[in-house]
């Protein structure tokens, strides 16, 4: 990055903070009116302006009618390009869609809707999240006239809890690339981030001493088969041999091993029973792993965390309630 690029980046960053210093999350549908769309020449556009000045000076010095005509012609093209670039972004309607729940360490995905209520098509609109520490990953899309286009942007989910969508930058250089029009939007969307599952958690705890065969830990004794990979599964349990055999048939999908035998009559996941020497986040991580393991093996489990007490159950609703409690647990 040269000196001019660094100066431009710093000025753009300061201007962005000044223009949007009081703007928070924008609920509902947002309209990009003219005052929200900014336009400036790009680096090729600045070079184009210098070339225009040089052509005009040469035409004046040598009194060239053809030089004047050529200079005014390409200047008119630049003006038309400026109008089309601005029109390509202005008067769009924006709305936030769904945000998927993820585990800490994964990528949270936010669905964004671009609504074009004008008759003309819009091309090469680039969207990305902007903010401190966020990677600059742009995604381009076209929006046909009188239609809606959905775009999904990703951002790292580093900590558990609610993750608000970062600020979205929309920009375009269509059609000639001489001008750059951009705007900012703060979607009113958030994703729930679950604690990161412990990679090598101990076996599931037993609620009582009763077992089917009188020995062994819950669901850890006998190999029972393979199943599709689920988020949070340990890499040590990936069925590599089956993956290699079934790669063509399963379109590269991962599968993991699961075990049966020694199953407890009831599983209880109790935060208070974990070792107090463990860090709070480590205990939440272990509880998350146990919830995933219990669901994968089909073992009903009770859940106790703070004021949350759930009876033994199975299924997506029970799993979601447990993971949400873990994600939103407040540390003292």
Image (cartoon, rainbow, N blue to C red):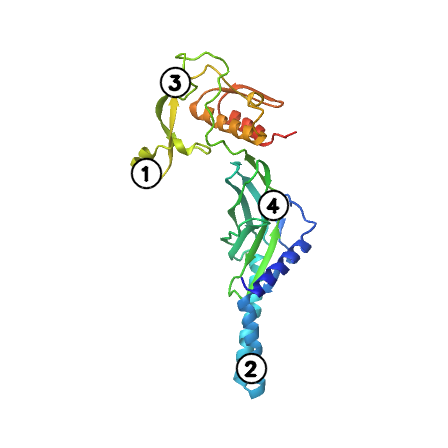
Q: Under tag 3, what secondary structure?
A: loop
Viewer-nearest residue: 69 or 282: 282
Q: Dot 4: within a 10 Å radius of its alpha carbon, few (fewer than 14), some, or many (20 or more) residues?
A: many
Spatial CA distance of label 4 from label 3 is 49 Å
Whether tag 2 and tag 3 are in contact, CB under 8 A, the answer is no
Cα–Cα span, label 2 and label 1: 66 Å
As drawn, the residue found furthest toward the left would be 245
Q: Find numbered disc 1 in the image and state the secondary structure of the residue it sits on.
A: loop
At x 69% / y 51%, what residue is drawn? 21
Disc on the earlier residue, 2 or 1: 2
Which-is-in-front pick, marks 1 and 4? 1
Camera-side residue of 189 and 207: 207
Q: Residue furthest right?
A: 22
Point 55% across, 78% down: residue: 71
Q: Which mark is residue 20?
A: none
Q: Which residue is mark 1?
A: 247
Q: Are marks 1 and 3 in contact (CB under 8 Å)?
A: no
Residue, disc 2: 68
Disc 4 target residue:
187
Circle nearer the N terminus (2, 4): 2
């Amino acid at each position: 990055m040269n000196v001019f690029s660094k100066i431009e980046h710093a000025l753009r960053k300061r201007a962005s903070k000044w223009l949007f210093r009081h703007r928070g999350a924008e609920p509902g549908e947002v309209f990009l009116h003219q005052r929200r769309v900014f336009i400036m020449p790009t680096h090729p556009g600045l070079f184009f302006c210098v070339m225009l000045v040089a052509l005009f000076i040469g035409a004046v010095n040598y009194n060239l009618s053809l030089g004047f005509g050529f200079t005014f012609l390409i200047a008119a093209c630049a003006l038309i390009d400026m109008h089309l670039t601005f029109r390509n972004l202005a008067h769009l309607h924006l709305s936030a869609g769904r945000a998927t729940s993820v585990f800490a360490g994964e990528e949270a995905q936010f669905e964004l809707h671009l609504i074009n209520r004008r008759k003309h098509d819009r091309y090469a609109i680039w969207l990305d999240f902007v903010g401190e520490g966020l990677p600059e990953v742009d995604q381009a899309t076209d929006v046909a006239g009188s239609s809606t286009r959905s775009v999904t942007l990703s951002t790292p989910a580093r900590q558990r809890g609610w993750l608000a969508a970062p600020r979205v930058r929309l920009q375009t250089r269509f059609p000639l690339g001489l001008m750059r029009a951009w705007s900012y939007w703060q979607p009113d969307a958030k994703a729930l981030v679950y604690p990161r599952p412990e990679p090598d958690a101990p076996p599931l705890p037993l609620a009582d001493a009763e077992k089917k065969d009188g020995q062994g830990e819950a669901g850890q004794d006998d190999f029972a088969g393979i199943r599709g990979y689920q988020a949070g599964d340990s890499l040590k349990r990936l069925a590599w041999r089956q993956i290699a055999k079934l790669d063509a048939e399963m379109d590269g999908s991962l599968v993991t091993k699961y075990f049966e035998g020694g199953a407890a009559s009831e599983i209880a996941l109790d935060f208070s029973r974990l070792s107090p020497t463990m860090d709070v986040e480590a205990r939440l991580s272990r509880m998350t792993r146990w919830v995933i393991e219990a669901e994968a093996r089909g073992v009903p489990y009770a859940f106790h965390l703070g004021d949350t007490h759930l009876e033994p159950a199975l299924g997506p609703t029970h799993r979601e309630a447990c993971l949400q409690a873990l994600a939103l647990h407040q540390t003292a």
